[in-house]
Image (cartoon, rainbow, N blue to C red):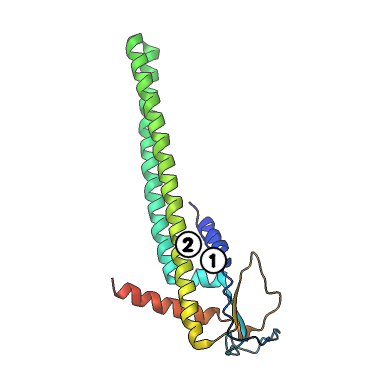
Amino acid sequence: MKNASIITNVILSVAVIVLFILHFTSKSSVSDSGSVTQGEMAAAGDIVYVQIDSLVNQYDMFNDLKSELESKAQTIQSDLTKRSRTFENDVKDFQQKVQKGLITRSQAETQQQQLAMREQELQNYANQKQVEMQEEEQVLYRRVFDALNSYLVKMNQEKGFAMIISTNSATNTILLGDSGLDITKMVVAGLNDEYIKTKAKR
């Protein structure tokens, strides 16, 4: 399982979040201003945005979960490689015995059937582990989604933004945006603070 695959899937999954918290009906003009610090202009009633790419890369919980998942994937891959090599060696040993006439035809048929069963078991095991890893990926996405969604709702009770939208490099929905309305750093800082508190309770 590749890092790029995990990151891309998480970004695409989380990018679906377009959290409409409509407390106000006022419209906010969006213009580019390099002199404004990120999130500095954002005020109650504004339409603000979060850059999901940056958020995911800087979110400690995501990075921790991703590392755990990658470590588990490497362990599974090592196990599968070891099992496959053992099986391949046994197949070669069987073939050599048949070629040298060291076993009877009956023994050869029995061992061939046993090897076929082992091959199927190995394939089933590999498929099972693949399904397990896919399920764990989905759990990772849901945990990140849930943490982000919960934090945005909590944060917006205080901030009162009219709308919080998401953007990323793959499907950029904001062609031009004032950096003062980009609350990515604020959200990342808040999420990481929440995550630190959660880890401390373990």
32 lies left or right of 77: right
Q: Which mark is residue 120?
A: none
Residue at x 41%, y 36% (from the top left corner): 124
Q: Which residue is mark 2?
A: 141
Quadrant position of the C terminus in the picture: bottom left
What amino acid type should be assigned to the residue bearing mark 2?
A: Tyr
Let me know if residue 102 appears in the view.
Answer: no
Q: Position of residue 81 (x, y in %)?
A: 40, 40
Q: Quadrant of residue 32?
A: bottom right
What amino acid type should be assigned to the residue bearing mark 1?
A: Val
Q: Position of residue 194 (x, y in %)?
A: 40, 77
| Marks 2,1: beta carbons within 8 A | yes
Let me know if residue 148 appears in the view.
Answer: yes
Instruction: Pick whichever, 185 or 71, lies toward us.
Output: 185
Q: Which residue is mark 1?
A: 14
Q: Residue 75, relative to residue 175: is it above or below?
A: above
Q: Quadrant of residue 201?
A: bottom left
Q: Label 2, label 1: how many angstroms apart (C-alpha)?
A: 7 Å
Instruction: Pick whichever, 51 or 154, lies toward us.
Output: 154
